[in-house]
Image: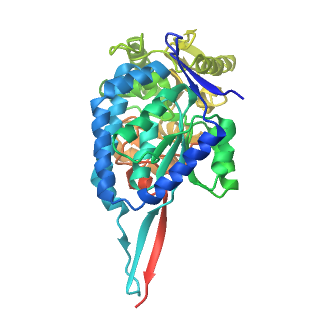
Amino acid sequence: MKKSITTKNPYTGQVLKDYQYHSENDIENILNSADKTFEKWRTTDIKHRTDLLQNLANLLEQHKEKYAKLMMEEMGKPLNQGIAEVEKCAKLCDFYIANADHFLADQIIETEAKESFISYDPLGVILSIMPWNYPFWQVFRFAVPTLTAGNVGLLKHASNTTGSALKIENIFIEAGYPKGCFQTLLTNHDTIESIIGNKTIKAVTLTGSEKAGRSIAEVAGKNLKKTVLELGGNNACIILDDANLDKYIDTIVKARMQNNGQSCIAAKRFIVTENIYDQFLELFTKKIKNLTIGNPDSKDTYISVMAKESLAEELENQVEKSLEKGATIHYGNERKNAYYQPTIITNVSSNMPIFKEETFGPVAAVIKVKNKQEAFKTAANSRFGLGTMVFTENIKEVYKEISNIPDGAFFINEMVKSDPRLPFGGTKASGYGRELSKEGILEFVNTKTVYINK
């Protein structure tokens, strides 16, 4: 078994740093520290917890460029997009500063009792397993509500963003959180089963692939530990006849190409009605051709390298298999090392990998359909269920379709995105459970019924 992690800059190929894995003894000490810290942290006044959130928000705003540069070096995120990611983490803190006390307050229920209510008690030590594509946001959207509810957190981050993981742990300490309140585990996936089985761990949350989700759910289920899983997606972006392309084309392009296309909630299948198909394809292609490509260190860059060369190879393989089944390259499809050119593919059918699988990179599958009915039927033809977006001027008519799409989100004239004020999560192979909003802060609490007789 490897005993260390080596991080590399995917743009330059330069080795960044080597990190030693935690030993079995190290992991045991981390678990014990988390357990002991929870016993004190769980009784901490909510006002103190939200004061620490303010410290956290201040640090994120103060050092956002430094944190963005770290993400850029580790996984190739363009600098401006990294800054926006850190700013979003700060806004997440602001949301729970304003709402946590209300969300966690006892809920009075009128019954025959002298007094009856629901209390929300923290569960304990929560393990998070997080991906590399949004190295700060994915972690903070778990940690902020979870710690504010009185739990403590452990992070197993993706190996290529180990520097980000350790930096986040340090940010929590610098903000004034107790040392054992949020800790990073430097380990590989071979140890995860034993960690989940440890009596200290009370629940697990994972953001990652469907394969990883199934594995974690199996281990957690065997140990009767709760899970929240945010897995893959192949979101549909429906373009109807009356869509205002001039107004929304930039949003539509961003929905696919942001973060070099490496997002579970990105638009991956563009389902376009035939009357607007040619107009859409022409404008979509023009916009994608004009995206600024280059070094992620430049604030002008919008598209750069993917996080690892192996990921670009995997995407290339999905495209090649789709071409063998009859798909056509409309634009792009050149790869060099970890760079994958923004690509548009047409003549796409439902038996192709780029239709039925998650494509994690800057490849857009464009599908022509006859009408609105066929568009929604095609969108619903998916094993995944993260979200669907629809662009139309007839919002009233599209309302009727909301219940026909079994996804976790339905966005009209906007790209699917996470917002601290709204619950976030999926259905089917995209997982279960919710993050953010009130639902997110209540995922890892004991919803306790209290009944006091007269």
Nearer the observer, 274 or 155: 155
* 197 vs 187: above or below: below
124 relative to 2 in the view: left or right: left
Quadrant containing the C terminus is bottom left
x and y percent of residue 441 in the render?
A: 42, 54
- The chosen color scheme is rainbow
| Residue 450 figure quarter | bottom left
Q: Residue at x 62, y 26 (%)?
A: 4
x and y percent of residue 240 in the render?
A: 42, 33
Nearer the observer, 188 or 359: 188
Q: Residue at x 43, y 31 (%)?
A: 167
* 146 vs 304: above or below: below
x and y percent of residue 238 in the render?
A: 46, 34
Nearer the observer, 189 or 115: 189
Q: Is residue 187 visible?
A: yes
Identity of the residue furthest to the right in this view: 1
Q: Residue at x 48, y 21 (%)?
A: 74
206 relative to 438 in the view: left or right: right
* 264 vs 287: above or below: below
x and y percent of residue 107 in the render?
A: 37, 70
Nearer the observer, 296 or 325: 296
Quadrant containing the N terminus is top right
The total number of labels drawn is 0
Identity of the residue furthest to the bottom in this view: 454
Q: Is residue 229 visible?
A: no
